[in-house]
Image: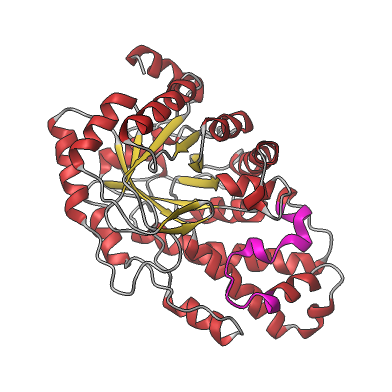
């Protein structure tokens, strides 16, 4: 783990908090507030294993950027030991939330950068409560499939619970097409900017994921053009009405074509996999979109690295500890979610234990894949060097601010 202190930065980068000290996880709102003030975007990266959390934090340290790590609702089930994570119970999710939070805290504890841990696509109040109890500093409640009034009611309930504990809350308005874990929709419903204003006002939510042409999963369409005018109009309406809040882009993986091609060369069978062009994401990052979620890119890079490992090291195919991973790669040529391949090393996934050199090789594959993708997007989204822009605030302090504002 990189642990050196960040050196002197430009004066405008140190006015918020000089000489950052090591600290526990921060509320995500602290990171989002800086993106609003200084006009840049923060990538938010999904993790499904201890070594992924380690890699995300280390690469952000290298670029002197704050870090937002995300655990999806079903990622918590997987990290709770449920390899058939789609069938995960609330107890599985509670256990997994604690495992993810413990991992993130371990590598953030002595880090010179601020780190937030966010629940991605919490499906109900119980999932959000489990994540907060486990140590998450931010939660998303996804009521986008509900009628507007029911979405408001559910989100407001989560806001009340989370804000009392200093946690940040993200909601969603409008429906993104695509498939990702339990999130599924055949068609998109674009967000109405005026509805977004009403939603912020009625819920007190800190951030809002909008539907403006992005899409969950690896197939977003070869020539997808996102509706930047929706983001612009929403932000303008918010400013006109005096609404504070952050706009979030879900389904924003770029799906690097070179990685898809490499996977297929290595025996994979992935077709119709296209992402959002980085140029479009860079543009909207200056137009009000401040948090950009990425998951698929990491999955692809890790899968390619695993396939390369077994291609280049035939003896590992019969390894007692990781040979099972090779068999799962063979049996699932169209899969690119590492959770399909990693059940043979669940102790490593859940707790970070590395029992032998063969498992260490797999962990190295995972970490390198994460860093390749995340490092690229830290640069593209312009969060490089901005770690010291983040206010050093605790959950208790944030809870008091919410209380004073009546939210």
Residue at the (62%, 78%) spot, across then down = 333
User: Is residue 332 left or right of 159 when viewed as pictured?
Assistant: right
Residue 209 visible in the shown view: yes
Q: Which secondary structure is most common in the magenta stretch?
A: helix
Q: Please check the rendered image and state whether residue 341 is part of the magenta-colored stretch, yes or no.
A: yes
Residue at the (18%, 37%) spot, across then down = 194
For the C terminus, the quadrant is: top left
- Vertical side of 63 occupied by 397: above or below: above
- Vertical side of 371 occupied by 11: above or below: above
Magenta stretch in the rendered image: 329-349
Residue at the (64%, 43%) spot, across then down = 100
User: Is residue 175 left or right of 334 when viewed as pictured?
Assistant: left
- Vertical side of 300 occupied by 34: above or below: above
Residue at the (74%, 49%) spot, across then down = 81
Q: Position of residue 241 (x, y in %)?
A: 15, 29
Residue 278: name its quadrant.
bottom left
Q: Please check the rendered image and state whether residue 284 is part of the magenta-colored stretch, yes or no.
A: no
Q: Position of residue 231 (x, y in %)?
A: 22, 48
Which residue extends farthest bottom? 265
Q: Position of residue 57 (x, y in %)?
A: 55, 50
Residue 1 visible in the shown view: no
Residue 326: name its quadrant.
bottom right
Q: Position of residue 16 (x, y in %)?
A: 35, 32
Q: Nearer the viewer, residue 65 or 159?
A: 159
User: Is residue 253 left or right of 23 when viewed as pictured?
Assistant: left
Q: Nearer the viewer, residue 270 or 97?
A: 270
User: Is residue 253 left or right of 132 when viewed as pictured?
Assistant: left
């Amino acid at each position: 783990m990189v642990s050196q202190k960040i050196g002197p930065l430009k004066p405008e980068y140190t006015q918020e908090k000089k000489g950052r000290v090591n600290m526990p996880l921060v509320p995500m709102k602290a990171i989002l507030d800086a993106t609003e003030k200084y006009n840049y975007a923060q990538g938010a990266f999904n993790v499904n294993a201890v070594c992924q959390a380690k890699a995300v934090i280390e690469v952000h340290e290298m670029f002197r950027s704050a870090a937002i790590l995300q655990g999806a609702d079903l990622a918590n089930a997987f990290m709770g030991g449920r390899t058939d994570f789609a069938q995960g119970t609330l107890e599985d999710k509670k256990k997994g939330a604690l495992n993810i939070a413990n991992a993130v805290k371990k590598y953030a504890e002595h880090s010179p950068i601020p780190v937030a841990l966010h629940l991605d696509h919490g499906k109900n109040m119980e999932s959000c409560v489990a994540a907060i109890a486990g140590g998450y500093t931010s939660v998303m409640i996804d009521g986008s499939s509900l009628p507007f009034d029911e979405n408001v009611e559910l989100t407001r309930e989560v806001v009340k619970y989370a804000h009392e504990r200093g946690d940040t809350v993200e909601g969603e308005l409008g429906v993104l097409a695509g498939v990702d874990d339990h999130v599924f929709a055949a068609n998109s419903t674009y967000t109405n900017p005026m509805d977004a204003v009403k939603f912020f006002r009625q819920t007190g939510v800190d951030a809002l994921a909008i539907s403006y042409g992005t899409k969950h999963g690896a197939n977003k369409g070869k020539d997808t053009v996102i509706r930047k005018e929706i983001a612009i109009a929403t932000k303008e309406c918010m400013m006109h009405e005096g609404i504070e809040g952050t706009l979030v882009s879900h389904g924003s993986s770029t799906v690097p074509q070179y990685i898809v091609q490499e996977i297929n060369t290595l025996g994979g069978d992935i077709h119709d996999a296209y992402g959002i062009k980085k140029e479009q994401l860079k543009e909207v990052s200056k137009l009000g979109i401040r948090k950009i979620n990425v998951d698929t890119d990491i999955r692809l890079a890790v899968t390619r690295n695993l396939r390369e490992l077994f291609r280049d090291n035939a003896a590992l195919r019969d390894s007692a500890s990781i040979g099972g991973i090779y068999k799962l790669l063979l049996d699932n040529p169209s899969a690119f979610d590492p959770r399909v391949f990693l059940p043979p090393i669940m102790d490593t996934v859940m707790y970070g234990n590395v029992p032998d050199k063969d498992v260490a090789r797999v962990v190295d594959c995972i970490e390198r894949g994460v860093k390749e993708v995340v490092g690229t997007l830290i640069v593209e989204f312009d969060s490089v060097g901005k770690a010291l822009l983040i206010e050093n605030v605790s959950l208790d302090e944030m809870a008091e601010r919410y209380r004073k504002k009546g939210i």
